[in-house]
Image (cartoon, rainbow, N blue to C red):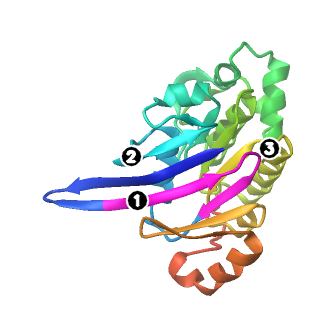
Amino acid sequence: MLELKHLSFTVNEGKNTKHILSDINLSINDKKTVVITGPNGGGKSTLAKIIMGIEKPSSGEIFFNNKNITDWSITQRANYGISFAFQQPVRFKGIGVKELLSLAAGNELSTKGACEYLAEVGLCAADYVGRDVDTSLSGGEIKRIEIATILARRNTQLAIFDEPEAGIDLWSFQKLIQVFEKMHEMHHTILIISHQERILNIADEIILIANGQIQQVGKKDVIIPQLVSIAGSCNIYKGVKDQ
């Protein structure tokens, strides 16, 4: 279980202090698919980065499997089973796709093994297994490879995805939904930052965040109708971008 207790995050802007997150209290149960949604600038991505350790909270505590991980590094959290997929994935000049997948898996993968993970995210393995993770890959391709690395990590207990639909084509998005459903069947805990309707519809629970605070937590059949009514202001249900 992931527990956030009185979590806040502030930044200094000159003489002023800006409150990005204020007194967040939240529990996410194991083996659930949870989607965090809400208006742009509401603090969603910041919260995801704090859980991963990319950002440090100004106050409050984070517990995972009853351990206080507030002061843990990104590496410690990753080793403990927390994975993170960026909205804009990092490119690694000089690192091949097969090598990256092997690093994620923690052992040298065979070409067949690497190809299996690439196939899971809808990539023709023969076209990608020998390529580098560099600027020759499109945004959609690099994002699918990043998701493949999460699948390759055998110790993943909590997988965090920051707007995974951003920049990918419709076919890739359909494959992405299948990946989430498979991870759910494998009993992973999945936390997704998203506005996308079909991602909201696979959630066991939806968390609405606005102005740095949790506005509501509930089942999708309760939350989604309310989101529809405020779609204009929250930019909910935006379409998938073309590559």
CA–CA distance in space, label 2 to label 1: 9 Å
Which residue extends farthest left?
15
Residue 161: x and y in percent read 62, 48
Q: Callout 2: few (<14), some (14-19), or many (20+) C-alpha neighbours within 10 Å?
A: many
CB contact under 8 Å: marks 2 and 1: yes
Q: Is residue 40 above or below residue 71?
A: below
Let me know if residue 136 appears in the view.
Answer: no
Q: Residue at 37%, 60% (x, y): give it.
A: 20
The circle drawn on residue 21 is 1
Q: Is residue 141 magenta?
A: no
CB contact under 8 Å: marks 1 and 3: no
Q: Residue at 66%, 54% (x, y): give it.
A: 168
Quadrant of the image for the N terminus? top right
CA–CA distance in space, label 1 to label 3: 29 Å
N-terminal of the pair, mark 2 or mark 3, is 2
The circle drawn on residue 183 is 3
Identify the secondary structure beneath mark 1.
strand
Magenta segment's dominant SS is: strand
Give the left or right position of residue 214, taking residue 31 as reference.
Answer: left
* In front of the other: 155 or 2: 2
Identify the secondary structure beneath mark 3.
helix
Identify the secondary structure beneath mark 2.
loop
Q: Is residue 33 above or below residue 113?
A: below
Q: Which residues are magenta?
A: 19-36
Residue 15: x and y in percent read 13, 59
Q: Is residue 171 above or below residue 62?
A: below
Please, what is the three-letter code of the amino acid marked with disc 2?
Answer: Pro
The circle drawn on residue 57 is 2
N-terminal of the pair, mark 1 or mark 3, is 1
Please, what is the three-letter code of the amino acid marked with disc 1?
Answer: Leu
Residue 18 location, quadrant: bottom left
